[in-house]
Amino acid sequence: MQRTRISEIFSSDSPLGEVLVQGWVKTRRSSRAITFVQVNDGSTLRDLQVVVDEGNPAYPVANALSTGCSVSVTGEVVESQGKGQRFEIQARELQLVGGADPETYPLQKKRHTPEFLREIAHLRPRTNTFGAMARVRSAVAFAIHSFFRERGFQYIQTPIITASDAEGAGSMFRVTTLDLNNPPRREGSVDLGEDFFGRPTFLTVSGQLEAEIFALALSNVYTFGPTFRAENSNTSRHLAEFWMVEPEVAFCELDGLAELAEDFLKYIFGHVLENCDEDMQFFNRWYNEEIISTLKGIVDSRFERITYTEAVDMLLQSGESFEFPISWGVDLQSEHERYLTEKRIGRPVIVTDYPKEIKAFYMRLNDDDRTVGAMDVLAPGIGEIIGGSQREERGDVLLRRLRESGLNEEEYYWYLDLRNYGTVPHAGFGLGFERTVQFITGVSNIRDVIPFPRTPKNAEF
Amino acid sequence: MQRTRISEIFSSDSPLGEVLVQGWVKTRRSSRAITFVQVNDGSTLRDLQVVVDEGNPAYPVANALSTGCSVSVTGEVVESQGKGQRFEIQARELQLVGGADPETYPLQKKRHTPEFLREIAHLRPRTNTFGAMARVRSAVAFAIHSFFRERGFQYIQTPIITASDAEGAGSMFRVTTLDLNNPPRREGSVDLGEDFFGRPTFLTVSGQLEAEIFALALSNVYTFGPTFRAENSNTSRHLAEFWMVEPEVAFCELDGLAELAEDFLKYIFGHVLENCDEDMQFFNRWYNEEIISTLKGIVDSRFERITYTEAVDMLLQSGESFEFPISWGVDLQSEHERYLTEKRIGRPVIVTDYPKEIKAFYMRLNDDDRTVGAMDVLAPGIGEIIGGSQREERGDVLLRRLRESGLNEEEYYWYLDLRNYGTVPHAGFGLGFERTVQFITGVSNIRDVIPFPRTPKNAEF
């Protein structure tokens, strides 16, 4: 008999008849001559109630089930008398597949702290929160691919191991096969020419520069892959390993990019609201009571667009006392971003044209020679969710900016080549996948939105 | 005016009227009082012919265009008189956006060797081959996500940086932030406890073990991400960095897995044949004249299933003289696999139940105590394309196998926990993404199916 998923049973209009259900026991309670077993198979947040009568040969087995046991059940789907569930299953046969000793099984019927669950990250996917998280993550990932596919973007896998550095700064992880205890040396120093790739190599911090290569041939491309930061940041918003989405578009300027970012966020949020209602209700109930209305608000709103200079004026005139004083030329802090999007404007804001000193060398210099075509998307409840820019497409300007930034122009020969041969205006942005999932679910610690978080001193599992 | 993609112009039934087209010049030829410019924008393999008459103010600009220049053209789409193209565009305006000095631009109108193109991997996406490759890769990636999504699988991002080793062997890249020239030491050795994660860490060789964690909670999951091998293999089939797809299914045994693998390959190949006809015709013409018929053959065929023992018998009775002699207990070599699938059976073959000695510790031990529930899918023209197995779900057997393999059982405590708590039969396989793209396109060197290949002594771009 073919296995039926519990999600299929609940999404059917009428009882499905005789089915085979397989999953894990959430709870069991016995009441007089009946045992009720709540079974979950991960296809949905909802457990299926399995009813086993005393007369059933499987009754002793059912009556001894505990949280975490795996079971295989055949029986008839019927309308449920219990409240909160439409269908249940009257067991004909029930088999214990794998036990879970209640004396030692760490997941019991109670709330566990996120800290405890991180220690048992190999079992936490069996909890409601992490099951829902996995389904929402997967839906968001699919929405990302669908959005770009529908718009004719090609998905490009940019390299993870790299010899270049997209930001011209930032802490990177080294990748090596040298014997650390006894590395080859040359004139006293470790000879990295002897390393696997014949040169120093690192884990990528961004696929942007390589995505530009493909945008200047295929017009519309995006990356979606892991990126890395070797920063010793133990905060609820930082991971050493996280996934990033980076579209890059040829013949596109800052306005077009802002439009793409707005459409993109609305599409993803709309997709999750439409496809993950049950899981989102769960997050809304237990993690952030406003998250569904916030997401709906974003989908329905027109994003405001202001320049950095206008933003600074608004902040100066606000009368608020900020921890970090604001003035033209300093970067916006989280408190400033939240004031703008939450208090002042009340919906998402796209801030453009930042001072060149606080932005990367590859951002397009504006005619004022003071600002660059950068763009940050700020959303209520989270602050910055997307950062991007129009790229400097003029070879001479780029070369000057490279030199001003103290970068080695020879290492960027290929990046300059893109400007020397068939250059075009182009633009792109980056979206941190985990921060987006964090925002969508309302879960406060980023360690709890990724299967196995990588943070300083932690690479378990 | 909104940009129109060239693919839209060609896929329309009738001329689209006045459009704005932007792209890169493939070639230009001038004939009497007319200049013909072939423009490509990456949305399709096909170039759009732009016709500029002598009377047009832009004629001098058009007449000076060379390969690689970027242009912006407005004009009327009309039926083309030329052969091989249905539509062309009568330019009204034409602007040179970015030049490309023909004296130095490396891509000219001639065939370049793959070796030369690898050296200019930042420009090769502008060639027909690499444009087609990017589109096919993207289509295959999307087909992978769609296949699993349609079947209720959740996409899981397993970690890239890991402290465990899925194979219990294999060369791995170390990830470190230690100063190689002056690392902290403890009792003479480098103190890896001082490294970023407080322990030795490496780049993953497979997400399987972590995918099992999620399969034993969500039932149906898959990974799709980069994996790494620090092997000094300079062959046309090996990369140090490549992408892998790894589904993992709970309550699934070897038969169910074989069915999934067959459905999966047929779905992907069918998707490419249906959605990438133009690009596939190109590969069929220039790279492998049989590739379309081979793919169609696989989509239409029923995969044969034989055991390893039957395969060895077939090989022994074949009368062929193999470079590597065959006998029960040795692994199948490429020549054996190709004999079976190409000469003997003539269609894809799934070989199951290999000797335990030549397979990994986590594969399920069969009742004969000699073989394990392993599965390889062999396809004509390529050999092994998928490798997988049913996983050992019995805690005591797994522990014995771990010890026999000389692995440290304490490091695998969480993998054993999955068997101690709610264990279920489960199975999964791995598909190398680049080898699949190599097979689909008929391109012989794996360095030419990935944007930026990572191989020994090469991490350029």
Image: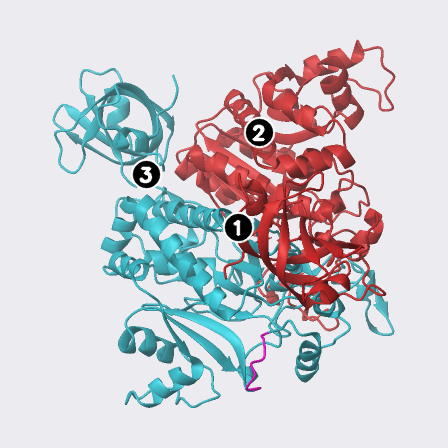
Chain colours: A cyan, B red
Q: Position of residue A25 (x, y in %)?
A: 31, 34
Q: Position of residue A378 (x, y in %)?
A: 39, 70
Q: Is residue A306 left or right of residue B446?
A: left
Q: CA distance from mark 3 to mark 2?
A: 30 Å
Task: Relative to A270, say whether A317 is above or below.
Answer: below
Q: Chain of mark 1?
A: B
Please tell me whether residue A365 belongs to the stretch shown in magenta.
yes
Query: Mark 3 = which residue?
Result: A44
- For the residue pair A431 and B376, the one nearer the viewer reads as A431
Q: Chain of mark 2?
A: B
Q: CA distance from mark 2 to mark 1?
A: 34 Å
Mark in the foreground, 3 or 2: 2
Any mark on residue B17, and which? 1
Secondary structure of the residue carrying tag 3 is: loop
Mark in the foreground, 1 or 3: 1
- For the residue pair B294 and B58, the one nearer the viewer reads as B58
Magenta span:
A363-369
Q: CA distance from mark 1 to mark 3?
A: 50 Å
